[in-house]
Image (cartoon, helix red, strand yellow):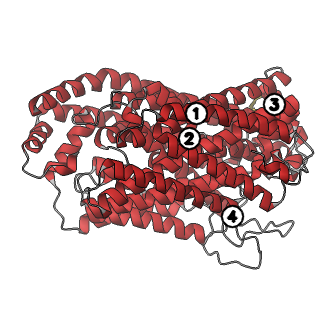
Amino acid sequence: MSTPQLLPLATDIGNPALNIIIFGLFVVATLAIVVRASRNNRTAADYYAAGRSFTGPQNGVAISGDYLSAASFLGIAGAIAVNGYDGFLYSIGFLVAWLVALLLVAELLRNTGRFTLADVLSFRLKQRPVRMAAAISTLGVCFFYMLAQMAGAGGLVALLLGINGKAGQGVVIAVVGLLMIVYVMVGGMKGTTWVQIVKAVLLVIGAGIMTLWVLGKYSVNLSSLLGAAVDKNTTAGENILNPGLQYGLSGVTKLDFISLALALVLGTAGLPHVLARFYTVPSSKEARRSVVWAIWIIGIFYLFTLVLGYGAAALVGPDAIKAAPGKANSAAPLLAYELGGELLLGIISAIAFATILAVVAGLTIAASTSFAHDIYGQVIKKGTVSADGEVRVARITVLVIGLVAIVGGIFANGQNIAFLVALAFAVAASANLPTILYSLFWKRFTTRGALWSIYGGLASSIILIAFSPVVSGKVDAKTGASLSMITDPSIDFHWFPLDNPGIVSIPLAFFLGWLGSVTSKEETDVDKFAEMEVRSLTGAGAEKAIQH
Amino acid sequence: MSDTRSVGDRDLATYREVQAAPDFTELRRRFRRFVFPMTGLFLAWYFLYVLLAAYAHDFMSTKVVGNINVALLMGLGQFASTFIITMVYARWADREIDPVAERLRGQIEGGER
């Protein structure tokens, strides 16, 4: 970790050396755990699904670690600090979405599948085309999600290590990416899961301490904290407590808000890296217990971020946050510095780094499993490849995905990450969720329906994003600066008015799944359907845990 | 794994028999009669909240106690309802689904050997 010292240090807050030491300690500790955990990695089920040997509570903590990304911590706290109440919607959507996973997806998926989402979707349909489609959408969702995490890494680096140059930030993004590659290649799912668990515990404790600290400053009175946040905000004032500051400007922004809400609530149950976690427990009962644990941890954490967001608004102030490198994403670290000086800043930043690292590792293992097991093992080699061969391909894929993540992260550097993650949710809700629900609950669902729904949802959501103001043509009304990914304001090819495509692409994908099925002559495979339905509800024939 | 079996296999026929058996249809009915209405309920409550936040600013901005307004209380209400539904479902599934599912599973897997 000596690279950053070669780069110009220009930060005015915090102590980069201290930040690096604390982060280094985390890396050493987790690497030791990963190496220990990897000693038992023998079979494909070990590498992909941690031998299905985690308990419900352990997996619940790991799910929280996987799910509480930089978007949840830095992004939401920043959105609340800057945009007030509208930032709170992200937490609510991210949390309520878990009920879809709990009630409709987690247990049934655990009982029917083996390693990937595609296992379930192709269960009673034509294997190869459906598996291919599901694998492609898995890779697509993981890519968008990863972009968001890596962008967060860039912003954080800017603030913490005082590296303001894009090149220097790029180097640190690369270091984060390489570390993640080591974790996943060495540790497989088991190592990755332990990294998630350690990180989740640290994150919840860190955020909890800051929350109590902030509340303590206002004699444990939420109302006076909100009052202080109002006083500190010279432009919006009272409005930061009300909905509409960010999304209430016009009819279009209100529609955007609804589109975002839809994508958030339906996205979680379609996220491949979250679904993969259900395979790491021995039974559907444990899958249920893990979701219950995850909902409590995630819910409590989001209550913390509400306090942290308004705390940053009150103690740091929106102007200082917007002016900081990393902009809104810096709200939580700046608050830590305000409360506990260099040491707390160092600890919180190390936790934020760990968060990014762990989530990227989770995404990578899901994506590489899907590539090796679905595309290589089942589609290309038609199931003739040995499990060892598949795992070898999975490890190589990890390397490739890691490099893609590094390059993508360098490009996405500087975007608000909660917002980028919301795009990944829109893609997941459009491409994956309709097919998951149809294949679990609708007997007449066919291969054509699945392909139309997956490809239609994937293509429509990505095309609408490409031609939305997110990519080009969004200009700050006051300063004239570009707010899009393409920062040259003269390039403008957007025609879709909304930032989030969910309100169009999600209903479209549901419609295509229905239309493809009713127009298809394919007969329902009654035997496979019976097997899937019986297995999903009773757990008969489900994959068991591996004993070592 | 399932995809190595072909249609006409002995234990696929068993799955079809199980699917048609009254025990199983009752389990499926019980499961769906809980999760579908519950899903409808929490989605309706969530979208009611989202629509109010988008289109009823004045109502949502009404102060209740100090600086705590309706919007904040309704947002916290979403948290509360999520926690409650989670606990209710987990208890219900432990009691109403697991025993039946385990019994059927034992029969199927026992019959396969």
Place of residue A44 in the rendered image (x, y in percent of width and height, measured from the top left): 36, 43
Residue at mark 4 to residue at mark 1: CA–CA distance: 30 Å
Disc 3 residue type (three-letter): Leu
The answer to which image quadrant residue A203 occupies is top right
Residue at point 19%, 32% (across, down): B26
* Circles 4 and 1 on the same subunit: yes
Q: Image height check: is A425 above or below A216? A: below
Residue at mark 3 to residue at mark 4: CA–CA distance: 30 Å
Place of residue A224 in the rendered image (x, y in percent of width and height, measured from the top left): 83, 28
Pointer 3 and pointer 4: residues touching (CB < 8 Å)?
A: no
- Kindly report which numbered mark, 3 or 1, lies closer to the viewer in this rendering: 3
Element class at badge 2: helix
Disc 2 residue type (three-letter): Tyr
Sequence-earlier tag: 3 or 4: 3
Pointer 1 and pointer 2: residues touching (CB < 8 Å)?
A: yes
Place of residue A223 in the rendered image (x, y in percent of width and height, measured from the top left): 79, 28
Q: Image height check: is A28 above or below A491? A: above
Q: Which mark is residue A344?
A: 3
Q: How many residues crowd mark 1 within 10 Å: few (<14), some (14–19), many (20+)?
A: many
A262 and A116: which is toward the camera: A116
Place of residue B31 in the rendered image (x, y in percent of width and height, measured from the top left): 29, 33
Residue at mark 4 to residue at mark 2: CA–CA distance: 23 Å
Residue at point 53%, 70% (across, down): A463
* Circles 4 and 2 on the same subunit: yes
Q: Which mark is residue A67?
A: 2
Residue that mark 4 sits on: A411
The quadrant of the picture occupied by the N terminus of chain A is top right
Disc 1 residue type (three-letter): Ile
- Kindly report which numbered mark, 2 or 3, lies closer to the viewer in this rendering: 3
Residue at mark 1 to residue at mark 2: CA–CA distance: 8 Å
Residue at mark 2 to residue at mark 3: CA–CA distance: 24 Å
